[in-house]
Image (cartoon, rainbow, N blue to C red):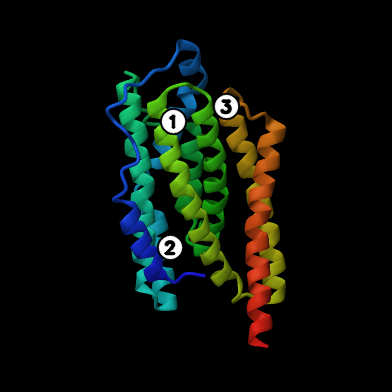
């Protein structure tokens, strides 16, 4: 378990890493572009969120727990996501395609975020979406022979692994302060959110997943593994904390 200053330092350091060789030229075949372009544009749009609603929830939460470093960590986390959006946007520009300004999936998730002021729901939602992002960007990496796109995808997947760890640790902190019945209720809510989110993602982006060699059954299997690994992390670490305390 890491504290908030650790994550502040991690994100600051990671933002200085240069893993993409922009001297490479994009190289997509017409078939590759047709298979991935829509999803590439849609995920780029999603990565460019200003995070204002997340910051609002994080500000309230950080004040409540008296941890201002957590708010700074969230701000840096958002900057890292925006970096992904900039890099994907630059790639879209270089293949001479238009960036999306609107997409049904992004609109749906933005409307949900607009009404969400709970740090708990924000955190579990990010865990689910970041887990899907790991699979998506690996599929995008494998869908083409373009070395520039592959390097962009590798950079993002490295970041996403840390993002999930950051969010899992926060979920553990939030979860351990709940009563038994609230824990049981929360697991049910998480599972419902997970179910609808993964089906929406598959519905919108199945062509790109399939182009990267991931069929629906495999996507669902990978998502269930990632989701229940997060739940297992929260539960097992909470149990260990209680045992150590006793």
Sort mark 1 into few (<14), some (14-19) or many (20+) by Cα contacts within 10 Å. many
Q: Is residue 118 visible?
A: no
Mark 2 vs mark 3: which is more N-terminal? Answer: 2
Q: Residue at x 40, y 78 (%)?
A: 66
Q: Is residue 106 left or right of residue 121?
A: left
Q: Which residue is disc 2 drawn over?
A: 57
Real-space CA distance between mark 2 and mark 1, rounded to the nearest whole angstrom: 34 Å
Mark 2 vs mark 1: which is more N-terminal? Answer: 2
Mark 1, secondary structure of its residue: helix
Q: Residue at x 35, y 20 (%)?
A: 97
Q: Which residue is disc 3 drawn over?
A: 212
In the rendered image, the quadrant that contains the C terminus is bottom right
Q: Residue 196 placed where, x, y %?
A: 65, 43
Q: Residue 55 placed where, x, y %?
A: 38, 59
Note whether 167 is above or below 67 in the view shown: above
Q: Residue at x 53, y 65 (%)?
A: 169
Check contact, mark 2 vs mark 1: CB within 8 A. Answer: no
| Image quarter of residue 241 | bottom right
Mark 2, secondary structure of its residue: helix
| Image quarter of residue 3 | bottom left
Mark 3 vs mark 1: which is more N-terminal? Answer: 1
Tell me the mark number nearer the camera, choosing from 2 and 3.
3
Q: Residue at x 55, y 61 (%)?
A: 168
Tell me the mark number nearer the camera, choosing from 3 and 1.
1
Mark 3, secondary structure of its residue: loop
Q: Residue 165 placed where, x, y %?
A: 52, 58
Note whether 30 is above or below 233 in the view shown: above
Note whether 207 is above or below 30 in the view shown: below
């Amino acid at each position: 378990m890491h504290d908030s200053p650790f994550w502040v330092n991690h994100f600051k350091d990671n933002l200085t890493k240069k893993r993409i060789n922009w001297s490479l030229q994009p190289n997509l075949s017409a078939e590759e572009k047709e298979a991935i372009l829509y999803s590439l544009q849609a995920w780029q749009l999603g990565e460019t969120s200003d995070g204002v609603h997340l910051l609002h929830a994080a500000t309230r939460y950080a004040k409540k727990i008296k941890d201002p470093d957590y708010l700074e960590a969230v701000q840096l986390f958002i900057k890292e996501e925006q970096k992904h959006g900039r890099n994907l946007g630059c790639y879209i520009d270089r293949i001479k395609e238009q960036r999306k300004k609107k997409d049904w999936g992004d609109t749906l998730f933005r409307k949900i975020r607009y009404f969400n002021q709970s740090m708990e729901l924000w955190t579990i939602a990010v865990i689910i979406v970041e887990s899907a992002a790991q699979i998506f960007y690996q599929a995008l990496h494998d869908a083409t022979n373009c070395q520039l796109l592959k390097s962009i995808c590798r950079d993002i997947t490295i970041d996403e692994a840390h993002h999930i760890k950051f969010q899992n640790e926060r979920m553990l902190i939030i979860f351990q302060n709940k009563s038994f019945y609230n824990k049981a209720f929360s697991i049910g809510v998480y599972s419902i959110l997970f179910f609808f989110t993964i089906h929406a993602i598959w519905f919108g982006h199945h062509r790109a997943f399939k182009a990267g060699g991931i069929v629906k059954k495999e996507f669902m299997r990978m998502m269930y593994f990632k989701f229940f690994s997060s739940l297992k992390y929260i539960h097992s670490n909470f149990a260990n904390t209680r045992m150590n305390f006793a």
